[in-house]
Amino acid sequence: MERVETKEASAREDMRTIRKQTYRRVERPTMVASLQELSKASRSLVRVHLSKLGLELGQDELFLRLSQDNTPISISLLAEQLQIQTPTTSKMCERLQEKGHIHRTQNADDRRVIEVHLTTKGLEMAELVGVAHRHVEKLIQSQLQEQNLEITAEALKQLASVLRDAIPHAR
């Protein structure tokens, strides 16, 4: 009986040792870690400015997209363009309609389709969102050396393109 317990204790100790070694060996890729940190930091900074407007993250992108031409767009197409789920977009539109920023209507040709566009109040908010984004951008630019601005902007565009192109292949 004592021998069985000793084997079990030994096996448990071996597993602990393996886990410790595995955890030590797993290193986070530097590029991925940097991109995640950049994403968190930029989203946090934008969140601060949006909260002053009474908005949440994601709503800024919706305002900016709808303000491009302010013609009615279906919620499903809007979701696709924002790269978020349709139910999430629908709920976001409901909240913004309650605040008077968005007008929702049924499509004349297909009553199952709900379309949205900005109200006058929504267009004014879209302008404030643009101001907030420009403020964040100026803050970032003020901390970078002039010669690095263009290089950094180009590198970020290339990274975004690489990541977008990789999504279909990762599925």
Image (cartoon, rainbow, N blue to C red):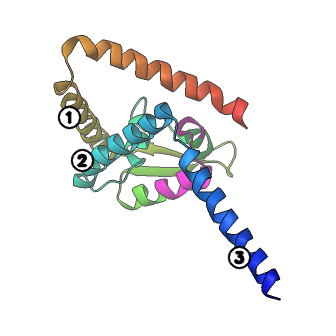
| Precedes in sequence: disc 2 or disc 3 | 3
Main SS, magenta residues:
helix
Residue at position x 78%, y 75% in the image: 7
Image coords of residue 32 (percent x, y) = 50, 35
Image coords of residue 12 (percent x, y) = 69, 71
Kind of residue sitting beneath label 1: His
Q: Quadrant of residue 162?
A: top right
**Mark 3: few, some, or many residues within 10 Å (few <14, many ≥20)?**
few
Kind of residue sitting beneath label 3: Ala
Residue at position x 24%, y 39% in the image: 132
Q: Quadrant of residue 80?
A: top right
Mark 1 or 3, closer to the camera: 3
Mark 2 lies on residue: 49
**Which one is in front, 119 or 87?**
87
Which image quarter is the N terminus in? Answer: bottom right
Extreme front residue here? 3
Mark 3 lies on residue: 9
In contact (CB < 8 Å): disc 2 and disc 1: yes
Tell me the CA gap for discs 2 and 1.
9 Å
Mark 2 or 3, closer to the camera: 3
Q: Indicate which disc residue 31 carries.
A: none
Mark 1 lies on residue: 135
Callout 1 secondary element: helix
Instruction: Confirm whether the magenta stretch covers residue 84.
Output: yes
In the image, residue 18 sits, relative to residue 1, either above or below, namely above
Tell me the CA gap for discs 1 and 3.
60 Å
Instruction: Confirm whether the magenta stretch covers residue 159.
Output: no
Image coords of residue 171 (percent x, y) = 73, 38
Kind of residue sitting beneath label 2: His
Which range of residues does the magenta coloring cover? 80-93
